[in-house]
Image (tube, rainbow, N blue to C red):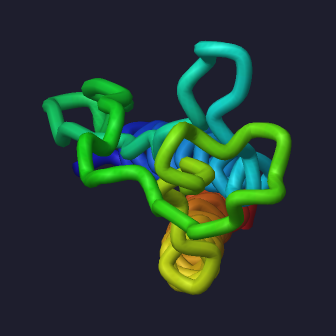
Amino acid sequence: MNLNRAMATSSSGLHAERFRMDVISSNIANANSISANGTPAYRRQITSLQSGPNGVRVQAIRTDQTPLRQVYDPGHPAANAQGYVEYSNVEPVKEMVDMLSATRAYEANITAFNAARNMARSALSIGQR
C-alpha cells in the first residue's frame, strides 16, 4: 500500500467516525424527548459503517425499533389515557460508551494518518541527502 493511499484510508476513517459521533450526539441530545400531541418520541439512530477499497464509509443510518420507554406519570400533560408518558428509547449510558468507542477509533485513525505522513516525510528527506 502506498503512503498516499494509507493517508486516504485513515482520512476516510476520520470522516466516518466524526459522522458517527454526530449521530451519537444527536441521540444524547434527544434522550429525554417525549411523545406529545401525536408526535412520537425520538428514536435512537444507529450508524452502520462499511469498508471498501478506498477506506470506510457510512453505509446507512437506521432507526432503533426497540420500544419507547414508558413512565407512569398520570399528572404529566403528555400522559396517555393509561397515565403513561412515552420517552425516547435512547439509553444515555450506552450512547456514552458508543461515543468513547468512536472517539478512540477517531484517535487511532489520526495516529495511523500521522505515521504514514511521517514515513512519507522521511522518504522525502532521504531523497534530499
Q: What residue is shown at x 37% (from left), y 39% (from top)?
A: 5
27, above or below 99, in the image = above
Q: Residue furthest top?
A: 38
Q: Residue at x 53, y 60 (%)?
A: 90
The x, y position of residue 36, in whole percent, is: 71, 27
- Picture coordinates of residue 77, whole percent (x, y): 84, 41
Residue 59 placement (x, y as % from top left): 26, 26
Q: Quadrant of residue 115?
A: bottom right
Apparent side of residue 89 relative to residue 51 in the rendered image (left or right): right
Q: Count every numbered label the image shows and give the total.
A: 0
- Asked whether 123 or 103 is in front, the reply is 103
61 up-or-down from 10: above or below: above
Residue 84 visible: yes
Between 47 and 73, the residue placed more toward the observer is 73
Q: Residue at x 81, y 58 (%)?
A: 75
Which residue is rendered at x = 15% and y = 31% of the image? 53
95, 36: nearer the viewer: 36
Q: Is residue 126 visible?
A: no
Q: Residue 116 at what x, y percent from top left?
A: 53, 63
Q: Is residue 92 above or below residue 10?
A: below
- Foreground: 123 or 71? 71
**Quarter the C terminus occupies:** bottom right
Quadrant of the rendered image containing residue 127: bottom right
Relative placement, left or right, of 121 versus 72 is right
